[in-house]
Image (cartoon, coloured by chain):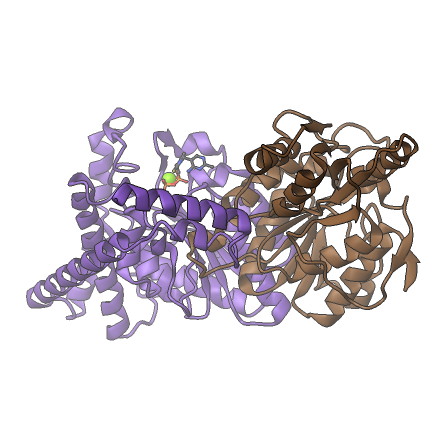
Chain colours: A brown, B purple
Amino acid sequence: MSQLNIVEAINLALHQEMAKDKSVVVLGEDVGHEGGVFRVTTGLQKKFGTARVMDTPLAESGIVGTSIGMAAYGLKPVAEIQFDGFVYPAFNQLISHAARLRNRSRGRFTCPMVLRVPYGGGIRALEHHSESMEALYAHIPGLKVVIPSSPAEAKGLLIAAIRDPDPVIFFEPKRIYRAIKEEVPTKEYVIPLGKAKILQEGKDITLVAWGSMIRECQRAAEKMKERSISCEIIDVRTICPLDSETIIESVKKTGRCIIVHEAPRSGGWGAEIATRIQEKAILQILLVFAKP
Amino acid sequence: MIEHFNPLEGKFLQILDKEGNVDKLLEPKLSVTELKKMYECMVLTRMADTKALALQRSGRMGTFAQVLGQEAQVAVGFAMQKQDWFFPSFRELGILLARDAPLELFYLTFMGCEEGNRSPKGINNFPLSVPVGSQTLHGVGVAMAANIKGHKVVAVAALGDGGTSEGDFHEAMNFAGVFKAPCILFCQNNQWAISTPRHIQTASKTIAQKAIAYGFPGIQVDGNDALALYAATKEAVENARKGKGPTLIESLTYRIGPHTTADDPTLYRSDKEVKYWQERDPIKRFKIYLQKKGIWNKKYEEDLVKRCAKQIEAAIAKAEKVAAATKPEDMFKYMYAEMTSELKEQFEYLQKNLEAKEE
Ligand SMILES: Cc1ncc(C[n+]2csc(CCOP(=O)(O)OP(=O)(O)O)c2C)c(N)n1
Ligand SMILES: [Mg+2]
């Protein structure tokens, strides 16, 4: 155990997976020599060499497209896109190929890759550096979308993502990259994808969130406690596939739910969760509210 | 040889001219068996393609892209080795057949059945790629991976002249050059992208010369000359395998048929142009070449045509059987390694509705 922030926890996970599995490779803009603009990949190239930790040309479609080829060939590429606002050039590769290679080829070819993307607002950066478009990705059948909320979560979820046989988009809440330190187990461990976590039990209202909004929910819950309102907090962790069951069971119990995300409200993933709650628990709910 | 055909100097590789005369100096050394295989594959490709048109017209198959006139492409498949990987776009039936793709896969794909993209194990032909140009990056990625793993595997990615305008082609060329990836970008310049002529795709004099800007060789080849295509691809593949990096091959050819069965080419090109290219037919000149070598005769042709017709009938029967056996479950089964609970729920819902409909 040691006290780590999210950047350090992800870095540790990458070191351990690369040491354990020779097929894991890292690529992206500035990820090698420099260790990435957020230093998440620091030390990897020195340890594992330039063949397995590649500084690439500045071309996102190229990064994702070649990763698809590498994955189909049997490597496990962990590609980094420098910022959330710069994945769009690679969208065609994600939708038309990464997401459906398995399906299109009836399982003959697969795409076990991870796309790491620092995402979300709160770092006082310029335009295109504070996007929260997770719903776009969660809407694409064939992809998995993971968003950790803390250092220990980030490590276990990233290891699970790397070992997953399908393409995973791993959104890292950059706003809390270094804001939280917590105990992170030194050994490797896996947090299964598609399983939400009840962070705090409560009986009056369910707060559903992911990424950096978990911290906001925890703060809100503290305030509510002063007013004798007991909040249950659910960290969704994997927005796709979504663990609706855990959410719905909680809402059945509390009768109320607020879904909190950073993204634009209309057509957001909160709306999807609200729909699922209404489909399954319409008789038990008093209020569902998706709040950006 | 490739280095002697600098496209910037206007060099163009042709070994077999339209009359079937061979350039003895450049003629690749192929055995009688190999030559026959190449010819037979071209004939099968043309017959299978023609048959597909009939199937489409009678409603047994959907829209598809004919390969008519571009059959010399089979040579690319024969210049590759079994362990190599091929990344088609959608007009490479000939290369796929040369790389041992079962013919029924072609029919299945255009019957709208994904089973057509299930390449048999051991045959590394990627699924067809319709988003123009996008497959080139997969080829480069596989080549990079082969390098990392230390495997002597070469990737060949095909695209059209229109495809060279897509950003992905340029990113693929750039990654290929930077990582010295063992790959070949094989561009069939059939001079049209639907109704758009080649000169609207690029102001470059040739497509081949683009390679030079990316730091590796490019060569323009007579794409209706199987011998030239074979020689160029063979050398490029060997160079890649030896660690010398990528090559861009521009195959100058012509699409005799419409873009797809949904296209009307009379809207944008003249009969005269088509006739000019029909006189440069790839099969006709190869036949003369074989005849001169004493390999081809009428009896051989008759037997070959009969054999191909039989093979095509069998492939169609098989394709229709497989297509008919496709189940709704398949839409869900292959999305992920393990069906997610969300998909399971949707699948069960569909199943229930289908059962209710039957009752
Ligand atoms: C990204 C993309 N844009 C447009 C299309 C529609 N489309 C299909 S084929 C084609 C022309 C392709 O021309 P070319 O690359 O020269 O190949 P050819 O059809 O001549 O073999 C177009 C525009 C597409 N499939 N993908
Ligand atoms: Mg074309």
In this view, the residue in front, A160 or B76, is A160
* Rendered image quadrant of residue B283: bottom left
Is any part of residue B101 visible from this angle? Answer: yes
Q: Please identify the quarter of the rendering in which residue B151 is found.
A: bottom right
**Residue B225 rendering spot, x and y as whole percentages:** 30, 55
Instruction: Please say if A281 is above or below A146.
Output: above
Q: Nearer the viewer, residue B122 or A34?
A: B122
- Residue at (66% x, 33% y) in the render: A270
**In this orientation, which residue lies closer to the viewer: A44 or B291?**
A44
Q: Quadrant of the N terminus of chain A?
A: bottom right
Find residue A76 and report its horizontal and vertical position in percent.
63, 61
Q: Quadrant of residue B81?
A: bottom left
Q: How many marks?
A: 0
- B262 to B207, vertically: above or below: above
Give the answer, above or below, for where B148 lies relative to A27: below
**Looking at the image, can residue A41 be seen?**
no
Residue at position x 17%, y 49% in the image: B51
B279 on left or right of B228: left
Q: Quadrant of the C terminus of chain A?
A: top right
| Quarter of the render that holds ligand 2 | top left
B123 relative to A166 in the view: left or right: left
Where is residue B277 drawn, in percent x and y? 24, 42
Q: Is residue B161 above or below residue B137?
A: above
> Residue B239 in the image: x percent, y percent?
52, 66
